[in-house]
Amino acid sequence: MTETSTLGLTLGSDEIASLVWEVGNDFQTFVASLTSNGNALSVIPSNAQITGSSDPINIGYQDGSGSTVTVLTFELLPNAGQYKATLNDALDQPNSEEVLFNLGVKVTDFDGDSASDTFVVTVKDGKDLSLDPVDADLTDPSVGSISEQANLSLGLTLGADALKTLVFIAPAGLEAALDAITSSGYQTSVQPQPFSSLSDSIAIVIDDSTSPNNGETALSIVLNKDANGVPDGTYTVKQFLAIDEPSDVINLPIGVRATDTDGDAISAEFTVSIKDSDASGIIQASGTVELTEPDLTPDTGGQGYPDSADTAIQIRTQNDRLLPNTAGIEESQVATVLSNLNGVLTSDGHAVVFSYDATTRTLTGTANNETVLTVTFPAVQGANGFDVVVSPTLTLLKPLDHDENGTANANISINGTDISIVLPLQVSDSDGDAVTGGSSVDLVIKDGIGPQITTVPELNVEESDINQNGSGTNSNRPGTTPGGVGTDEDTDSGKLVINSGSDNVKDIALDVSAFAANNTSNSQNSAGNDVPLSSKGEPVTLHLTSDVNGVKTYTGLAESRQVFTITLDSDGNYTFTLLGALDHPLGNEKNTLTINLPLVVTDADNDSTTSIIKVNVTDDVPFSLETDGVGVGGGAW
C-alpha cells in the first residue's frame, strides 16, 4: 500500500534549490531492530548515506535465495512539497500496535537559505488472525482398518502478519478424559508426556501387556503441515483401533492456539466425537472370480467342461467371531438377484433359469433341463480366530452365450467377450447377527476360443462325366463319358473337421457374397485372357437355393443355367455335383481349374471362422479316345 502526505512547506521569495533527508544517527540502528515476518530488516544498501540525500530510503532484507525483498520505501516529492511511503509487506509489532519512524528533511532555496523540520510516519498493526475450527466425527473402525477425517479446517484466517506458531492447548478436563480412555477393555496412555509439553499432536497408545495390540496407536490428532513444515491450518484425526464408549459416544474438547509474528494470539476449541459402531461386523473386501470357457472338444491334456475357479475374500469382524458355515448370498437380496438373472442368459440358445438353496448356499443355473453352472461359498476361519475367508467358487458345466447386445442390470452385464455376475455377500457372527456391508463377488465368465476349421478336403470332378441336363437355353451338353448323375466323377464329397472351441457350432454356410471375390481369374475367354469363373462365356454366380432341416443347397448359375450344385449339412458334410462345363484355360488339353467356395462356421456366441472349399474341375477334351471304350465326337464344352 502507498500513502502520500504533505511536508507543509511555505516558500519565500526564492525557489527551492534542494530537498534532502535529515535523520538522526540512530535511524539505521532503529531499522535494524525491526523484522518483517521474522526477517531482520536493514536499510538497503546497508552503506547508504541518508542525511543530505534526496534518494528514496529503502528498508528490506535478503531472502534465502539471496534476493532483495523491499518491505518499506520512503520517497521525497520536491515539486509537490510531499513525501510518499510504500509498504510492500507486514512489519512485525511484537510489543505494540504500531511502529514509529522519526524522519526529517532539510529544504534550501537558491539564495542558500535553508530550514529543517521533523515528522513521524506511523505503521499500524493490521487485522488480527482468527480461528473457527470444525468438529470431527468418527465411528469405531473394524479390526485392521482406519477411521479417518483428514484435512479438517481450523478456520485459520491470517491478518496482516504471518503465522508464527500453531499448537494444541488443553482445555479443562481434556487430560482427565484422555486418561480414562480404554480400547477393547485394554488400558491406554496419552502422548506426549508430560502433557504440558503438548504441541502439534495428541496420541492415545495401547499400554497393556495383555493386549495383542500393545504399543500400537489407537487414536491420533495431528496439526497438518505443508512440504516446508509450516502449519497449513488443518488437522487430521485417525482412529486405528476401537475405543470403548460407555455412553455410545465420547466427546473430546481439543484446544488450539495460533500466534502471528507480531505476537498476537488467538485460541479456539473443537470437539472430536468418537461413536460406537452400530454393526457387529463389516465385510472388508470384495473379489473377482475369472473363468474362461473351456473347450468342448479338448485335445489330450486340455481343459474341457466342467471347469471351476474361485477367489479368496477376507471378511473382518469388529468384535464377534464370524461363522464360516454361514457365508452366502445376502439374504435380503436373494429375490432381487434371481429376478435380475433369470431370463437374461442363454446356453446354446436355451434360457438359463437360476435358483438358490439357502441351506447349502448354492446358486444353480439350468438350461434345457441341464445344469449349466453352480456357485458355492466355502469358507474357513481367519488366522486370528475371528475373521472369515470366503472362497466363492464358480463351476461351469456348459457354455454360455456371450451376446454382444446383452442385457445389463445391477447383478449382470453381458458383452461379446465377458459375462459379469455380481453377487452380494453375507456372513453371520456368533451372535446370529447377519453381517453385510455392500461386499460382493464379481463372477466374470470370459468367452473361450472360437470355432476352428482344421481340415477341408479338396474335391475333384471331371467334365467328361457330366450328364445331359437342363432344357432349351438352360441345357448342358453331356461329357464324353457320361455315366449318370452322381454315379461317376461328376460328383465328389467331403467332410469338414471342426474344433468347435468353447461353444457349440450354430451354423455352417457358404459366404455367397464373397464368392465373386474368391474367383476372379479361374477361367479364360476366347482371347486367352483370365476372367472370373465362367461357363460358355457367362459369369458364374453362387446362390443359396434351399435350406431345409439343416441341409443347405447352393447353386452355381451362368445366367439362369445351372452349372453346379453343392449341398452342406450341419455336421460338415458336403457334396459337389458338376452340371455344366466351365471355361478352362486355353490349350493344355485336359487342364484343371479350381472353384473356391468361401466357407463360414459360426458358434452360439456368433464367433466365426472362415476357410475355402476347393473344387478342382478337369477339362473335357472333345473327340477323345477314352480308356473305358472307343468313342468319337461329343464332349462337354
Image: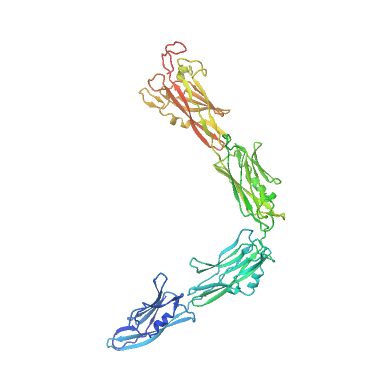
Residue situated in front as seen by the camera: 63 or 609: 63
Disc tally is: 0
On screen, residue 298 versus residue 26, left or right, reads right
Q: Is residue 333 above or below residue 176?
A: above
Residue furthest left in the image: 111
Residue furthest right in the image: 431
Is any atom of residue 608 visible in this view?
yes
| Screen quadrant of the N terminus | bottom left
Residue furthest top in the image: 630
Question: What x and y, as percent, mark residue 119?
Answer: 40, 85
Question: What x and y, as percent, mark residue 489?
Answer: 49, 19
On screen, residue 180 versus residue 91, left or right, reads right
Residue at (71%, 46%) from the top-left corner?
A: 359
Residue situated in front as seen by the camera: 595 or 33: 33
Question: What x and y, as percent, mark residue 596?
Answer: 46, 28
Question: What x and y, as percent, mark residue 161?
Answer: 48, 75
| Screen quadrant of the C terminus | top left
Q: Is residue 168 above or below residue 619?
A: below
Is any atom of residue 329 visible in this view?
no
Residue furthest front in the image: 209
Write down the quadrant of residue 76 in the picture: bottom left
Write down the quadrant of residue 343 in the picture: top right
Residue situated in front as seen by the camera: 174 or 461: 174
On screen, residue 411 versus residue 620, left or right, reads right
Residue at (51%, 71%) from the top-left corner?
A: 157
User: In the rendered view, how is the structure colored?
Assistant: rainbow
On screen, residue 75 versus residue 299, left or right, reads left
